[in-house]
Image (spheres, rainbow, N blue to C red):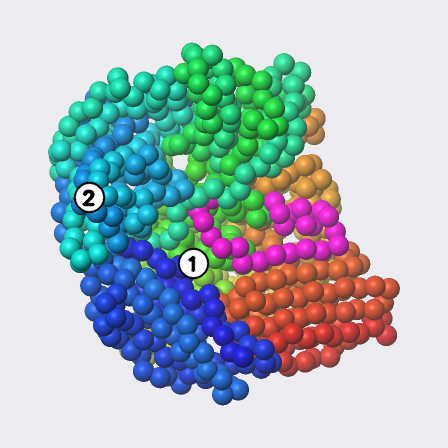
Amino acid sequence: MLKLYDLQVIHERNPLGIDEIPYVSWKLDSDWQNTMQQTYQIDVTDERGTYCWSSGQKADGRNCFHTFEGLRLQPKTRYDVRISVTDSHGESASESTWFETGFLGKRWEADWSCSPFRSTKRKPGFGKQQPAVIFRQKCKLKEKPVKARLYATAHGVYEAMINQQKVDDRSFAPEHTVYAKLLCYQTYDVTDAVRAGENTLDIHVGDGWYLCAATRPQMKKNDHRHAVLFQLEVEYADGSRERMVSGEHTLVAEGPIRSADLFGGELYDGRIEADQDAWSWKPCKVGNYGYANLQGQVGAPVKPKCSLAPVAILQSPKGEQIVDFGQNMAGRVRIKIDVPAGGEIILEHCEVLDKEGNFFNNIMSAGGVGKGCDQKDVYISSGKPVVYEPHFTYHGFRFVKVTGMKVTSESIRAIALSTEKEELGTFECSDASLNRLYSNICWSQRSNMLSIPTDCPQREKAGWTGDMLVYSKTAMLNEDCTSFFDRWLKNMTCDQDEYGIIPMVTPNVGSYPIIGKFSHLSNGVKGQGTSSGWGDAAVIVPYSMYEVTGDTEVLRIQYETMKRWVDYIITRCKEGTPKGCTRDKEVEQYLWDTGYHYGEWLVPSQNKNGIDMKNLKQIMASSSCYTAPIFGWYSVSTFGKIAAILAETSGEGTYTEDARLYADQAEKMKNAFCKGVITEDGMMPSDLMGAYVLPIYFDLVPEQLKERFAQKLVASIEAHDNTMDTGFLGTPYLMDSLVKIGRKDLALKLLWQRKSPSWLCEVDQGGTTIWENCFGYDEQGNPSSLSFNHYAFGCVADWIYRNVAGLDTDTPGYRHLVIHPEPDQYLTCCKRTFMTEQGLSSVHWTLEDQNWNLEVEIPCNATADIILPNGEVHKVGSGKYHFACVIGD
Ligand code: BGC
């Protein structure tokens, strides 16, 4: 029987309050093998059951990213979407889903309510901010409504409560965005929360990103005040409606949170909470902030991922009481407190302990980053027993030093936070350390996907673009990141400047714009700061999304942003000539070889003792001589491919023309690289490992030099005692470049390497997340001051899934899978599952003596080539299969 499941609108389940043109996706399930979708039909009706739109029956096998071309949406309306499908066995199935629109650009009736309390520019550090405020409004409802929606947003971050109950368990609404241009509002279904008679709406607002010193947005006008905008709209059984809106009549009071900062932590005074009668309620001022930057939230909110009990409660040599949760993460603690009034409970967070086992704050402080990262929460007791969890902060930690009370394993939990996303994959094999590496990668991903992709949860919490360029494909193979990335890419578009530059951090906030501009200007380049490999995320992240899911929508939506970025690269190539350059103009004009670039970043051999600040400039130059021209070419050629994809799917002429132009430009850049960067006798301007990895991987080596490059790469690995020596930008391509030159054995050697630097060395040293730098500890065992929770080097998971488990594809969106596990001397079994855009795929192989067994699952609407170790190839359609062979015959 054919069934439809996993129906999604804009890659979310039943999104509320969307201001987007929606698209819909679904999956097929069937008892039959070889099931392919033959036709589909989409019908849309509104909440009154009125027919709105139909695609008509289409002979089309695509089951995802279908837009409703020509559908005219009404604001604040629920739409039902019915999908009907027929398959290759003549069966049919239908299923429905729904979504609800938001304001769709229509004017808000509410005014901004703005706090009248004294407000100044925030300072970094614990306890240095003004109190969080509570906005309150009451309303009387004539009866219990049949439908109630709360639309809300804030300057700061907020938690909304109706009748003292939180409206949901999200944190940090309204998300981290480029506020001057994009501020999300949230829509809540509060039908169950409101009642007949009096209702109280409280919106508790803390500083969040909007007001925080380290993440202050680039805005001409910022009055540093907490503010809210909300509309509570209800509908009664008789169809009549009522609305309650924010404005000057909204009251506001300073509450028990005396200060809160995303980096510094929160100070909560329970005595103030207990004495609510003493709160001083004041009417709000009306804020003249306008509505132009408002948009219904895209992408899921930040939610608790899980709660962890302590694995140990330690007493350090210094006498500190330290709770070990056994897992590094982003989040905060929930603690039962029962101490006399005025008692202070201090919670200090860290990722690692020092060599002796004492509390250790590993926050590198350089160039302003890391300033004020106190990671400390303090609760002052009212004398009543409470369960306290901070509201407007989060930390990167595994250990918590607790002062002021005795903790037991029952009294404290760590609450891991992350943007809510569905997990798409699993990985398990016969080796415990590889399983731990997989878990570490997943934990670093979770910890660093908190509203935006961040570099690390304890130091910068910043949307470094390059880190995600490196990691985006792996991210997509672990969790459903589509709508999360969609939101972040919108930020990127907002942050693009008049030159087309995508900054190195997005949202480009706090001190980053100044640091960026300065590094750019000191290299004689105009516009905001960027770097090759970082700004290129504008093209590479959407393309990775497309590769994994087949998402052409993101390519269409981000098209202009990508185009402006690649045009910037092309201009930089043309206009920039390095001092003393002797290259032929014909070659030089196609090379990106001037400006500020990070290079590969954190190449192990160059950063043994943390980031080598003294020699940073020289270190960056030693690899940017190849990363800049290569990533410049990579963006331009990928953009050419994207134009060709859109030309094919939409048939639009401009795409066809762009496809030709940018492919041509990319070809010239490639030739320039071969002539201008690689010398005739096959030398690279630098002898780093990445200098060979990248040209090999990207096919940038002239035919006659291929052998030489392969030898150079192997020699470089041998010279490093069979350890990896690539930085952020080289590592995603290291293992594949070895497969490409026929040395998968060497790639496996690197994967299974236990000497430092290597992935498993981190595991052996007790890592529970992926480290910023492979050297977490020095030779004496002292922890580094860098972060222990950066996902970039975790990009190896993508290679492991394809090359160890053997689950791969040669088609965007996994429409055609290539299953080719190869037994090796390291494992006796391995299992990988991945929820593709078509449905669940899985590979499970075992090796016992010489008997090799393989269980495979191929989802409906996909086909696969299954290549056995004995060379047999089976071409199959959807279904479950078993294969066996004897190895070594
Ligand atoms: C961040 C990185 C980032 C880098 C750029 C660091 O401080 O943590 O992950 O990509 O700076 O240089």
Please name whichever residue, 116 or 79, is drawn nearer the observer in this view of the structure.
79
Q: Quadrant of residue 643?
A: bottom left
Left or right position of 1 against 371:
right
For mark 2, does the 10 Å Cα neighbourhood hold few (<14), some (14 to 19), or many (20 or more) residues? Answer: some
Image position, residue 825 (x, y; %):
80, 58
Distance from label 1 to label 2 (Cα)?
Answer: 39 Å
Residue 482: which numbered mark, if any? 1
Residue at image location 26% in from the left, 54% down from the top: 146
Image position, residue 809 (x, y; %):
57, 70
In front: mark 1 or mark 2?
2
The three-letter code of the residue at mark 2 reads Leu
Image position, residue 379 (x, y; %):
44, 20
Kind of element beneath mark 2 = strand
Which quarter of the rendered picture does the N terminus lie within? bottom right
Q: Is residue 421 visible?
A: yes
Kind of element beneath mark 1 = helix
- What's drawn in magenta, residue-wise? 418-440
Please name whichever residue, 537 or 73, is drawn nearer the observer in this view of the structure.
73
Please name whichever residue, 745 or 327, is drawn nearer the observer in this view of the structure.
327
The three-letter code of the residue at mark 1 reads Thr
Q: Is residue 43 above or below residue 236?
A: below
Residue at image location 32% in from the left, 18% down from the top: 275
Which quarter of the rendered picture does the C terminus lie within? bottom right
Please name whichever residue, 518 or 671, is drawn nearer the observer in this view of the structure.
518
Query: Magenta includes 102?
Result: no
Q: Reading the chain from its start, which is encountered first: label 1 or label 2? A: 2
Q: Is residue 508 visible?
A: no
Residue 268: which numbered mark, if any? none
Image position, residue 452 (x, y; %):
40, 46
Query: Magenta includes 433?
Result: yes
Residue at numbered disc 2:
141
